[in-house]
Structure formats: structure tokens, C-alpha cells
Image (cartoon, helix red, strand yellow):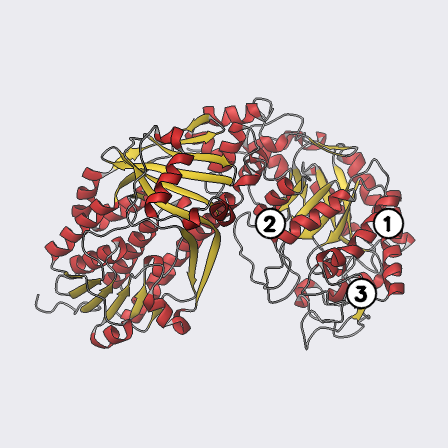
């Protein structure tokens, strides 16, 4: 057309003939018929691996909008279903309302081949693509859709900066000629360990069957020594009841350890990654094909709407990265749940099924109730939850203390004390949250000595005036918010002390008036910036232990109902636990048992003076989020040790031990650590970390991943968070009573009126 602007990327090379590469080629050609597009695929056109492909309604909607012809072809082939079956020790439980669509991978490729040929894309099968750098010199755009083992990504790793994480399970893709009307999860508890099966229909009376298990189970079963045929036969034997005598068949199937791919950048010059080359997400939450097709849709749209190639590639990445990151967080939660499946199978059938269905945090208690209210009611009945009572409003007992619900106001440093003494601010802050309905309100970290403060604004319990001030606060809570418990968190800053108030420069040394620091080892928190602490000697260890004891005695006299020992976040006791901060060569260093010695000595000394009827908890950092640091396996050992010494619950946080940590932030991102500790260490846990909604709390409690949920920022935003959660759910029972002066406001006010 005369006068039409030239197409962005007039000459395009596509490396890889999977669904993502094919659909990107088709869309780019459809948007600009004048483009010259060539696709290289090293395999034959009818070669494919795996069997069925699952696509979401969201993905199909994108295809319908971008390419009605492909959508119409897909719609004729799709198999749809709504149900999920969970088989637990011979009991099959069905949950409905989920919505799935799938078709055979081979048929999907055929449809995309036809579409590319119709549009004029040149398809070169059985041909290895030239290197991306060579193609980039002769083409305007190179689309690298060359999969999880991408040669393009690996060749240019300095540009894309990939991180590849191999996980603990082995899995194999198989199929059976078995008609299914539901997605199916089934467990086999064998002499070698737990194995799991994921199965779903994909057309023609056939179903995809994925068998997965921990690497050590795979090896104990001898599956590492099986060829393709033997592997299918052995897996068929483990799940013989499900198959009903039908064989499992393979298609160049091989055992694989799933690899999560993350890239810091998705483009380099005129080369761009899509699909598994750019990112992967575990199959238990969806399909890599789904993500690859969505990448193709986004890339083609950005190239159509953005006049310059660099801007288009930037827009593509900005558009897709948040959605992919969200999917990868959910996928990681899901794959870790399956990695630790042996810790879940002891749950009763309905709670096991609920735990499985909500494992990724994308399906929640409220969401699942909308899909299948009867199923959720059965889960709640099995758990003994009274009808009409949200799980978060059931009571929980710790030693002699019964909490009326499962909500905790998490410890939050306020940096507003003077000389360690809490004042009116703390009375209003803690008092308001006690009136707001939470069962337990925790203080910030209360320091056991002046030298144990983090900042000059930190509270303490090392002087008579501190005790008196705290008694005023606990008295208010007990008198004005009856039924609400208040707990004290005792700690010592260690190497992270003598710093400015948070809003003046977090972890930065004071400009003047610094006090000397002590720690497990003489290692500054920020080398070259922070003060170097003195390593505690035997006399220093005894003195600090005695400081904790005196503060615990004062906390009892001040009227606290619960005491938490702070062994997390890089403060003094945490500094003993982590190998990154404890380099001692005496009895208090070295092995984990040695690193545990001093925190346990402090715990024992405090437990000895803390009244027997009052509970005592311990906050730990379950991982340092840093190479060579404390990890999830260590956290279980640490938690078990404290439980054996009398801890009534473990408050499971993570990180803040070293400044170069790399946390995997996300919704409820610390909960899997709490879940694992709860089941492997057999101790109640308090879950914390980006738990922000009452739906999250209900989900975690009902699934059995946590006993209590501690929320921080939500209680800063809304001191009455718990009462409002009750109102939002229409709950008026004993788990969330409104204070008498507030009862008139127990119904949400109208937001406006129509004329």
C-alpha cells in the first residue's frame, strides 16, 4: 500500500518450532503480510514430546482476539472439563467449578503448521538454525523460542543473565488410552517413598499421565536404571488401580528434573527470548505452552503498536514480566508442595485435598467456596469447624493461654521510645490494635539492655521505669479489650545495633553517640560501613543470658501473657544460628548443634523463670536467602530443638541476616517454611510474611499450613483489621467480639446512595 509505514522488523528469524515459536511467526506474518519470516526447527514436523496441552480461558481469549482463524480451529479440537479429582488413600474427592481446556500437542502443532503455511511463513524442518548472532546480522529480529535448554540464551548468557534452578523431583510424561472427565491427582505410597500422578484428558479418549517423585525415591525404586519401556511399565504398576489394566505409553519419554529458568533480561540487541527460553513454570500449575503462546501474543502486539524495535522489545518485556513473575511464584509454591508431599499425606482426606487445591495460593478458601461450596463445607466439617464460622475465628490453645481466633498482630519496631521507655504512642498503638479484634497483640522487639538496642528509639525491659510503663499498656489491654492477649518479644540487636531510626537510614550507624556492639563473631553487618562488633567471651555470654532472664522476670511482673524469644533477622541470637555470621571455633560455633548451643541456653534460662502456665514462642529465620547460609533443612532442626526444650510454637520468618540476601518475595512467601516446620518438627507454627487478606488466613488455617497467622502492615493500615474481616464475612460469633463502645460501628457504613 502506497504511503504505508514500513513494518517494524521486516525480516524475522524464529529459532524453534514449538507452539510459541510457531504462533509468534504466524501472528507476526498476519499483522504484517509483507514481512519475510523464516522458522527453523531441528526436528521433523511430526516429532513432538509429551501428549496433551492445557490452555486457560484467558489464553484462548487472547488468541480469539488476535487470530480468530486459529481460535476457531482450536475450539473444534478442545476437550473441556470443570472438575478435579483428588485420590487420597483410596478415597476419591471431587471438586468442581475449575474450568480446563486441552488438546493433543501433536494436533496443536499441526494446526499451527497449517496456519503458518497459509500465511506464507517459511518452515525449515530437520534443520538446525544458524547461531542467533549470525541471524541477527542478516535479520531485523530474531525470536529465540528454542526451549528450556536454549542455545541462544546460553551463548549470550552475559547479556540475558539467566538463573537456572534444578529442583528435587524427577518426572516423566506418559499417556494412557483412558477417558477422563476430570483433572486427577493420585498418590502412591510405596516401599520406596511417595509417588504422585497428575493426569488430564486431551481428546480421543486419551489422557496425559505425569508421574513424579523425589529424586531419592526415584533412585531407591531403581527407576534411574530403567529404559523408556521399562519406566512406563513400572509406573503403570504403581498406579494399576487407576489404569484398570490399561498400559502407559511413552513418546520419547525420559525422566527429567524440572528446571526453573529466570532471566534478568529477555532481549539483547535485536534478539528476544520467548517461552521456556525466557522463563519456565512447573507443570503442576499450568502449561509452558500457555506461557509461550501468551508471550507470542504480547510480542506481536508490541511490534504492531510500537514504531521502533528497541521500544517494542522493551514494551514486550514490561508487559509480560509481571504476569510471568506471578506465575513463577505460584508455580514454585506448587512444586515445593509436591516436593514435600510426604509431609502432607497424613492429613485427613478432605483437608489433604483442600491443601493440594490451594497449594499455589492462587486458589483460596473463598475462591474455592465460590467454585464448589459443598466441597469447602465438607472440608470445614472434617476439621471440626462450626457451621458459619470462618476458620480464622476458631480458638487455639498454647499452654494455659486460649486465643479466641488465629490472628496475631506481628511485632513491628516503632522506634518511638525514649531511653527504652514506651510512652503514650505505644499505649495508643498497641491499645488500638488490641481493641481491633486480634487474639494476640505482640510488642516490637523489646531490648534486654541498653547496648542491646537497635536504635536509640527502641523499647527496653532493663530498668524499673520500663516495667512500670509496660504494666500500664498491658493493663489497658486486659481491662479495655478483655479476651485479647498481649505478648512481649525479647531480643538483643547484636551486630545490627547502634543504628539510626529506620526513616533516617535503616541499618546505618549513628552519626554520633554510638555504643559498642557484641556478636557471635567480629563481623560487621555492612563491611566498611557498620561498626565491627566484639565477639562475646564466656563472661559476655553469661552476662547477656542474665540480661534476658532479668527482662523475662520483668515481663511477667509487667503482666504479659506470652513471651517470644527473638532468634531471627540477624540479631544476636540469630547471629549464632547462621554459619554466615557465626565463625566461632569454640563450643558455640562450627556445626549446627554448636551454633544452637547458646540460643538454647538462653531459651532454657528464660523458660526457667517464665511462669509454667504462660506460653513461650521463638521467632526464627528459616532461611538466610543467601548461599552458604541457613536453609529450610536447618530450620527444621532448629525448630525441633527449641520444641524439645519447651517452645510452645515457632514464629517462622526468614532473612534479614545478611545484607546481600536474595529473597523470593511474593504473597505468603514465607508460609512454605512454616508449613514444613509444623509437620516435620511437630510443633505449632505462626506464619508471617505478606499475608494480607482474611481469605489468606482462612486458607492457611484450614489447609493446616499454620496454626496462627501474624500480620504486620495490614494492622498499620487498619488497626481494626480483624473486626473488619469478621464484618466482611458476616461473622458475629465469639471469635471476634466488638468492644461495647464500638458495637454501633460493627456494620460497614454505606458508601453512597442513588438518587
| Residue beneath disc 1 | 605
Residue at 29% from the left image edge and 52% from the top image edge: 293
Give the label, 2 or 1, closer to the camera: 1
Q: How many marks?
A: 3
Give the label, 3 or 1, closer to the camera: 3
Residue at 43% from the left image edge and 34% from the top image edge: 186
Residue 130 horizontal/vertical position (percent): 23, 71
- Comes first in the chain, label 2 or label 3: 3
| Residue beneath disc 3 | 586
Classify mark 2: residues with Cα within 10 Å, few (<14), some (14-19) or many (20+): many
Determine whether label 2 and label 1 are within 8 Å by CB.
no
Q: Secondary structure at mark 1?
A: helix
| Residue beneath disc 2 | 689
Which mark identifies residue 578?
none
Name the foreground residue: 329 vs 102.
Answer: 102
Determine whether label 2 and label 3 are within 8 Å by CB.
no
Amino acid at each position: 500500500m502506497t504511503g504505508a509505514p514500513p513494518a517494524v522488523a521486516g525480516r524475522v528469524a524464529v529459532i524453534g518450532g514449538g507452539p510459541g515459536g510457531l504462533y509468534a511467526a504466524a501472528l507476526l506474518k498476519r499483522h504484517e503480510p509483507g514481512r519475510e519470516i523464516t522458522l527453523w526447527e531441528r526436528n521433523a514436523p511430526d516429532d513432538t514430546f509429551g501428549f496433551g496441552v492445557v490452555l486457560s480461558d484467558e489464553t484462548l481469549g487472547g488468541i480469539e482476539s488476535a487470530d480468530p482463524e486459529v481460535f476457531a480451529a482450536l475450539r473444534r479440537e478442545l476437550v473441556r472439563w470443570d472438575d478435579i479429582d483428588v485420590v487420597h488413600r483410596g478415597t476419591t474427592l471431587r471438586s468442581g467449578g475449575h474450568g480446563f481446556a486441552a488438546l493433543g500437542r501433536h494436533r496443536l502443532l499441526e494446526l499451527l503448521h497449517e496456519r503458518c503455511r497459509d500465511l506464507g511463513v517459511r518452515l525449515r524442518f530437520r534443520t538446525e538454525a544458524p547461531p542467533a548472532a549470525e541471524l541477527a546480522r542478516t535479520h531485523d529480529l530474531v525470536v529465540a523460542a528454542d526451549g528450556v535448554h536454549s542455545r541462544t540464551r546460553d551463548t549470550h548468557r552475559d547479556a540475558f543473565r539467566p538463573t537456572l534452578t534444578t529442583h528435587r523431583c524427577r518426572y516423566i510424561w506418559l499417556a494412557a488410552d483412558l477417558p477422563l472427565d476430570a483433572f486427577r491427582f493420585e498418590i502412591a505410597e510405596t516401599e520406596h517413598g511417595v509417588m504422585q500422578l497428575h493426569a488430564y484428558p486431551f481428546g480421543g479418549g486419551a489422557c496425559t499421565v505425569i508421574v513424579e517423585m523425589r529424586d531419592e525415591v526415584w533412585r531407591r525404586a531403581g527407576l534411574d536404571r530403567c529404559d523408556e519401556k521399562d519406566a512406563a511399565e513400572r509406573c503403570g504398576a504403581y498406579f494399576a488401580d487407576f489404569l484398570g489394566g490399561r498400559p502407559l505409553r511413552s513418546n520419547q519419554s525420559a525422566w527429567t528434573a524440572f528446571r526453573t529458568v529466570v532471566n534478568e533480561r529477555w532481549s539483547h540487541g535485536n534478539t528476544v527470548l520467548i517461552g521456556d527460553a525466557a522463563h519456565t513454570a512447573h507443570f503442576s500449575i499450568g502449561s509452558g505452552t500457555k506461557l509461550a503462546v501468551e508471550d507470542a501474543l504480547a510480542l506481536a502486539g508490541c511490534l504492531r503498536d510500537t514504531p521502533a524495535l528497541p521500544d517494542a522489545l522493551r514494551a514486550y518485556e514490561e508487559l509480560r514480566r509481571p504476569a510471568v513473575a506471578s506465575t513463577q511464584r505460584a508455580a514454585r509454591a506448587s512444586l515445593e508442595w509436591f516436593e514435600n508431599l510426604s509431609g502432607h499425606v497424613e492429613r485427613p482426606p478432605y483437608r489433604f485435598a483442600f491443601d493440594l487445591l490451594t497449594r499455589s495460593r492462587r486458589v483460596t478458601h473463598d475462591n474455592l467456596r465460590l467454585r464448589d461450596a459443598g466441597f469447602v463445607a465438607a472440608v470445614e466439617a472434617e476439621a471440626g469447624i462450626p457451621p458459619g464460622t470462618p476458620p480464622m475465628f476458631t480458638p487455639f490453645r498454647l499452654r494455659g493461654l486460649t486465643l479466641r481466633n488465629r490472628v496475631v498482630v506481628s511485632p513491628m519496631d516503632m522506634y518511638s521510645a525514649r531511653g527504652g521507655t514506651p510512652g503514650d504512642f505505644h499505649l495508643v498503638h498497641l491499645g488500638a490494635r488490641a481493641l481491633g479484634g486480634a487474639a494476640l497483640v505482640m510488642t516490637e522487639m523489646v531490648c534486654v539492655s541498653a547496648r542491646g538496642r537497635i536504635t536509640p528509639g527502641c523499647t527496653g525491659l532493663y530498668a524499673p521505669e520500663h516495667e512500670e510503663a509496660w504494666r500500664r499498656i498491658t493493663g489497658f489491654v486486659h481491662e479495655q479489650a478483655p479476651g485479647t492477649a498481649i505478648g512481649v518479644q525479647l531480643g538483643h540487636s547484636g551486630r545490627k545495633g547502634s543504628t539510626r531510626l529506620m526513616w533516617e537510614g535503616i541499618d546505618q550507624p549513628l552519626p554520633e553517640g554510638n555504643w559498642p556492639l557484641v556478636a557471635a563473631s567480629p563481623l560487621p553487618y555492612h563491611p566498611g560501613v557498620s561498626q565491627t562488633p566484639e565477639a562475646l567471651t564466656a563472661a559476655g555470654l553469661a552476662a547477656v543470658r542474665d540480661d534476658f532472664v532479668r527482662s523475662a522476670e520483668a515481663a511477667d511482673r509487667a503482666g504479659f501473657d506470652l513471651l517470644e524469644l527473638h532468634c531471627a533477622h540477624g540479631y544476636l541470637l540469630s547471629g549464632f544460628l547462621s554459619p554466615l555470621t557465626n565463625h566461632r571455633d569454640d563450643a558455640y560455633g562450627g556445626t549446627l548443634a554448636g551454633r544452637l548451643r547458646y540460643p538454647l541456653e538462653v531459651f532454657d534460662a528464660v523458660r526457667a523463670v517464665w511462669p509454667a502456665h504462660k506460653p513461650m514462642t521463638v521467632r526464627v529465620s528459616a532461611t538466610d536467602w543467601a548461599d552458604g547460609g541457613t536453609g529450610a533443612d536447618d530450620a527444621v532442626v532448629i525448630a525441633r530443638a527449641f520444641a524439645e526444650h519447651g517452645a510452645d510454637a515457632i514464629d517462622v520468618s526468614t532473612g534479614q541476616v545478611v545484607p546481600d540476601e536474595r529473597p523470593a518475595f511474593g504473597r505468603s512467601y514465607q508460609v512454605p517454611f512454616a508449613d514444613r516446620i509444623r509437620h516435620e518438627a511437630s510443633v505449632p507454627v505462626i506464619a508471617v510474611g505478606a499475608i494480607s487478606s482474611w481469605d489468606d488466613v482462612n486458607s492457611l488455617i484450614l489447609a493446616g499450613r499454620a496454626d496462627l497467622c501474624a500480620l504486620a502492615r495490614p494492622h498499620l493500615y487498619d488497626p481494626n483489621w480483624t473486626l473488619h474481616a469478621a464484618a466482611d464475612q458476616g461473622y458475629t460469633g465469639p471469635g471476634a467480639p466488638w468492644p461495647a463502645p464500638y458495637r454501633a460501628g460493627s456494620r460497614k457504613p454505606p458508601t453512597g446512595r442513588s438518587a
